[in-house]
Image (cartoon, rainbow, N blue to C red):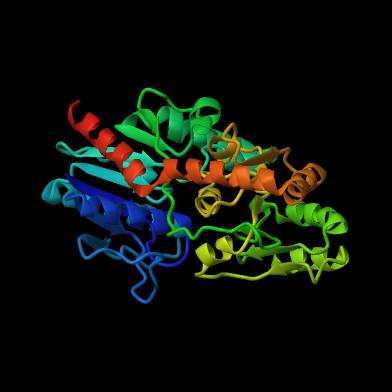
Amino acid sequence: MKITYFINEITGAGGIRKVTIIKANALAERGHHVEIIVSNYDSNGFFAEPISDKVKIVQLPSNHTSSIFPHLRAVNTLLKTRKWLSRYIQEEKPDFLINVGHSGRLLMITLHHYDTKFIYELHFNSRYQLIDNPQGWKYAYNLLKNWFLYRMAGHCWERIVLLTEHDLRYDWIGTKDNSTVIPNPVTIHPQSSALTEKTIISVGRLHSQKNFEQLIRAFALVNKKHSDWQLKIFGEGPERIALQHLIDSLNITQFVHLLGLTNEIPKELSQSSIFALASKHEGFGLVITEAMSCGLPVVANRVPGITDIVDGQQCGFLVQLNDHKEMAEKICKLIELPDLRARMSQNALRRANDFTISKVLDQWEALFYEMKSI
């Protein structure tokens, strides 16, 4: 089959880019013809994952025009992009065109040609903007936007793919007739942890959505009982200075380390014993599945994007959002009960096996063949 992805950017760091490349590579290895259309291609950028020679990158022609009216320029760009995509579909005739993330969702609902089937793949919880802005005009605006995109225009897609059953069951306001769930695959080559290092690890952007303040406050309580343990946080973002101030004010500077970005996440996971995440929400807790693939038990918030992975699997603990005391209690429990830590580690390894690239691709191929038969 001929499968084309449409994505805004493919170079640089980012889970969406990495997952897209990994799936494209694997589909190409299975004999499919795979192309990735990129609307903003940085020839000097780096790829989060090496791209197979079997995957073709197609750069969308630059449609920028000079105009003193930015909205007019945006409309002109949209129209030119639509014309180019229409010609691409007409000439290349892909079996499936998959829009990844936000990039072309408004554009795609106006394009229907020949036998190409359109898939909208969400890499985020469908209500995340409402969760981030729970009141005021932003809430009203995002609610109206979601209603249009998912309920009014949702039927324009042959299929919409969500990341979690929780999103489909509780948050999704679009029609469920053309919606399905396929999770992300584990994107690392895991290295097993011996669970002997007195280290708690967390990974993510230093951003309000990741809610590292809760984790740091929880660790301050852990530190009072277990001063021989440390917390390592990997990631960069706008909250670095504020978080460092918080760490200093809690007098845990020598125990909590903001270590920035690294290409050695599997190694760092293997040298830790507990994974903790305090996110307010996740599209799909990919970093949790990666931690579990290294055998780490998890302590995280009971929020969308995480419950599907951890809840009921006995591979970690879920706690109340913003309850740093409960988070500290569960971390201490894993520290103080090594047998429990080891048992949850084995459960985590088994659970992570549900998200191998092979199993995820089986689901995608099953979807493709089902759609082709309609």
Does residue 4 appear anywhere in the picture? yes
- Left or right, 365 with reference to 19: left
Decide: is 85 above or below 231: above
Q: Which residue occupies the foreground of this view, 312 or 129?
A: 312
Quadrant placement of the N terminus: top left
The residue lying furthest to the top in this view is 177
Name the residue at 65% across, 50% down.
277
Q: Residue furthest front?
A: 339
Q: Is residue 129 above or below residue 52?
A: above
Which one is in front, 306 or 313? 313
Q: Residue furthest left?
A: 91
- Residue 325 placed where, x, y %? 82, 45
Q: Is residue 238 visible?
A: no
Total numbered circles: 0
User: Which quadrant would the C terminus be assigned to in this image?
Assistant: top left
Q: Position of residue 47 (x, y in %)?
A: 38, 68
Q: In this view of the protein, which residue sits in the foreground, 142 or 279?
A: 279
Q: Residue at x 57, y 61 (%)?
A: 269
Residue 148's x, y, as percent? Answer: 46, 33
Estimate the x, y position of residue 143 in percent, counting from the top left. Answer: 57, 34
- Relative side of 239 to 114, left or right: right
Q: Residue at x 42, y 59 (%)?
A: 189
Residue at image coords 38%, 64%: 49
